[in-house]
Amino acid sequence: MERAADLWARLQVIDENLTGPLTLRGSRVAQFLALCLAHSGDSFIWAGLTVAAWFLGDRTWKTRAVITFAGLALAEIVVIGLKMIIRRKRPPGTSGMIYRKADPYSFPSGHAARAALLSLLAWQLGPLAAFVAIVAWSPVMVLSRIAIGIHYVFDVIGGVLLGGVLTAVVLAVASAVIARM
């Protein structure tokens, strides 16, 4: 048990050393822009976009929307569950108070999991323009989470890995369901 605590303490130091240089300090304009980017990954925005795609789209878009919405819901449930189990506190700071009050835990990053899931689903389901746009947006949004000081680097890495696993699950289930239709 002592070795595990030592390992965790060492990983925490490494994570803090990686995160520190990526955290914005000073410029209010840069912090505001980073905060706007951080909010662009909020789940309600993407859930709303998938609902709009379902209502406004043809059959292909409806299928994409249902699969994506299911992935977003699964990601939210799994991330919240893991955060409640792991209970890693967010980095110290005052930025991102909405996140700090609503969700005091940082590992894994739900925004990073969502970004990975959306990127991979767009790659698999198309269209190419959506994939290109989401892949261009994702790393900037995810880095903004670190820049505003509400996530450590390892939170984001864990979120991206989790998003990849959840995408595989969603696509496997979707394929099985579609095959039965």
Image (tube, rainbow, N blue to C red):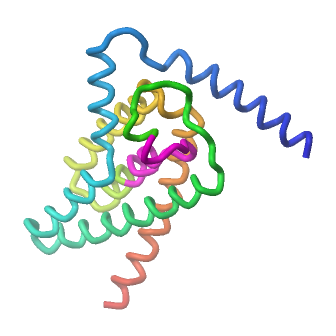
> Could you say which is closer to the camera, residue 99 or residue 12?
99
Q: Position of residue 175 (x, y in %)?
A: 39, 77
Range drawn in magenta: 101-117
Extreme-bottom residue of the structure: 180
Side of 67 where 128 appears, left or right: left
Q: Nearer the viewer, residue 165 or 113?
A: 113
Residue 71 x, y percent position in the rendering: 39, 64
At a point 51% along the width and 56% down the height, the residue shown is 79
The answer to whether residue 116 is above or below residue 65 is above
Total label count?
0
Image location of residue 21, percent across then percent down? 53, 15
In the displayed structure image, the side of residue 26 where residue 28 appears, left or right: left
Q: Is residue 103 magenta?
A: yes
Residue furthest front as drawn: 101
On-image quarter of the C terminus: bottom left
Could you say which quadrant of the image residue 81 lies in?
Answer: bottom right
Magenta span contains residue 35 = no
* Residue 92 located left or right of residue 27: right
